Image: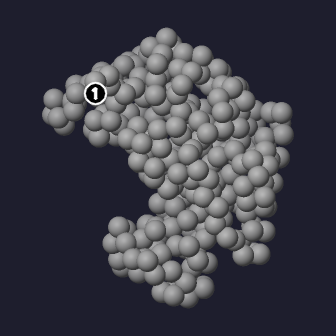
Amino acid sequence: MVRKKVTVVGAGNVGATLVQRIAEAQLADVVMVDVVEGVPQGKGLDLLETGPVMGYDSMITGTNGYDETAGSDIIVITAGLARKPGMSRDDLLALNGNIVKTVAEETSRRSPKAVMIVVTNPMDVMAFVAMKASGFPKERVIGMGGVLDSARFRAFIAMELGVSVENTHAFVLGGHGDSMVPLPRYSTVAGIPITELMSKATIDKLVDRTKNGGAEIVALLKTGSAYYAPSASTLEMVEAILLDKKKILPCSVYLDGEYGVRGAYSGVPVKLGAKGVEQVVEIKLNADENAAFMKSVEAVRSGCAKFM
């Protein structure tokens, strides 16, 4: 049996923690790419030396080039810059847009059949950039955001009600940012909608906290941003694809008529399997939810326009 191969571009906190999670789950051999000399090699070697203790034998390769990535089943792009004081989102957009474009071109050339998962922020726009640069069909370029946002919403619901997170299910649509659209009607505890279990005021408070989930962690850390939950959320997508699970997960995908949207990336529930996005699941939205969703789509579309 030929082992599966995953490339993770970016050896920062999210990328390196994802490599660790993939190895510990024994899902694939991993190639970790980063522009900083020595960092992917050092982290890769450290993780390789962890194998005997943790009981995994995934091969982990650290490199500054792209040749070692050839023949990957999945390419995960986490490379990019975090926003620094005084930088606007548009500054970040241009800088990370160039990084993601280069990564997508280099990796797609060497792994033409891979599925690409984009984690770099602003994620929905970066997924669009990666699709354009790679030339891959829309089914094989997917943005990670919805799984993370839903995990945060689920955690807050479980904390509020004092129940197991295993009982909570939550749906968050739209862009991965301030304009995301958590859907309380479709969010449940053991199958019971949360609208039956808590007041609107409480739900609104949890929705706001979900929308600001990333910012809350950045404010606490003061240097850097979240990486445990983002890497775990990416792992769930990697696993669904490698094991052909047909798992329904909220992901950012290029919409071509679904939800009345054409030509933009947005978070919606999709079926993830070996081919990438195998189905976009359309759920009925009420007028308020639809208005919020369309507003979110337009926010992403304005960012994408800069890369047309």
From the top left corner, tell me how far across and down residue 234 is, in percent: 47, 44
Task: Give the residue type at disc 1.
Answer: Ser
The C terminus: image quadrant: top right
For image coordinates 42% across by 42% down, the residue present is: 244
Q: How many marks?
A: 1
For image coordinates 48% across by 31% down, the residue present is: 74
In this picture the colour scheme is one colour
Q: Is residue 93 left or right of residue 167?
A: right
In terms of image quadrants, where is residue 117?
A: top right
For image coordinates 79% across by 45% down, the residue present is: 263
Name the residue nearer the viewer: 261 or 130. Answer: 261
For image coordinates 78% across by 58% down, the residue present is: 260
Q: Can residue 20 be seen at all in this image of the molecule?
A: no
Please tell me whether residue 79 is drawn above or below residue 122 in the rendered image.
Answer: above
Name the residue nearer the viewer: 154 or 81. Answer: 154
From the top left corner, tell me how far across and down residue 255 is, in percent: 72, 48
From the top left corner, tell me how far across and down residue 167 is, in percent: 37, 72
The N terminus: image quadrant: top left
Q: Is residue 265 left or right of residue 76?
A: right
In terms of image quadrants, where is residue 68?
A: top left
Q: Secondary structure at mark 1?
A: loop
From the top left corner, tell me how far across and down residue 230 is, in percent: 48, 48
Name the residue that disc number 1 marks. Answer: 58
Name the residue nearer the viewer: 111 or 201. Answer: 111
Q: Is residue 57 left or right of residue 28?
A: left
Dot 1, crowdedness within 10 Å: few (<14), some or many (≥20)?
many
